[in-house]
Image: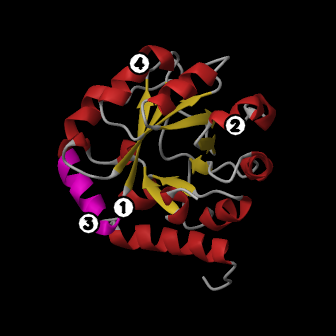
Amino acid sequence: MSKWHASTPIIAPSMLKCDFGNLSQEICRLESAGAFWMHWDVMDGHFVPNLSYGAMLIQSVRARTKAFFDAHLMISDPGKYLNDYIRAGCDAITFHIEAVSEPTALLRQIRSAGRLAGLAINPMTPPAVIEPYLSECDIVLTMSVEPGFGGQTFIPHVLDKIRRLKTLVGPTTLLSIDGGISQDNIRVAADAGCQVFVAGSAIFDESDYTLPLSILERLAKNTVDGASSP
């Protein structure tokens, strides 16, 4: 078991929803609230219809925190920019199966750099598409909204996909979910097999990040532990 499996459930704040005018302060607030894993959604305006930020911004704050940086590349040509995110200090790099027809070489490149390698899958993409590559993955990220914008509503049918993936991945592969995660649905996502929960609005819409982080973690943990209490 990896140290990250021992730390699950992991609540990963989606930095797409933070206040970028006070980015350093936001990172400090998250750390003070107990967050140790931060999820960076990178959008190129091509693979998804929106732009966010890139490796330069991530690198600019890397030295300010010891938190785990998970870069989620929602971009059309991840191989072209992979080394930028490695140099930026990302601890995990996840890219989309929809963007790369043969991901094995990129997954191995990420692992050879000492990072966790991840594949992401969109809500309408069947699990069979990534099944041949699961042995190369440290993380499998299921999108529970259409990628490209924060604040969307959770798509419940992706839970069947996660249940299927749970039967296919090895014991050291983390199952992550991204999109619309809240106190209302984190339990069902955990019950389906998720271990990493990317949450944006559920955290950043609150004035005190400690409370939503602790509630989300407790709800997910109670499900994993088989507890029935709320």
Residue 32 shows which numbered tag? 3
Type of secondary structure dominating the magenta stretch: helix
Residue 147, image x, y percentages: 56, 34
Residue 81 shows which numbered tag? 4
Q: CA distance from mark 2 to mark 4?
A: 22 Å
Residue lying at 62% horizontally and 18% vertically, measured from the top left: 100
Element at label 3: helix
Element at label 4: helix
Q: Which residue is mark 2?
A: 134
- The residue under label 1 is which amino acid type? Ala
Q: Which residue is mark 1?
A: 35
Q: Which image quarter holds the N terminus? A: bottom right
Residue 162, image x, y percentages: 73, 49
In the picture provided, is 184 more to the left or to the right than 151? right
Above/below status of 87 relative to 197: above
Q: CA distance from mark 2 to mark 3?
A: 35 Å
Q: Residues within 10 Å of mark 4 (few under 14, many from 20)?
A: few
Q: Earlier in the sequence, mark 4 or mark 1?
A: 1
Above/below status of 198 relative to 140: below
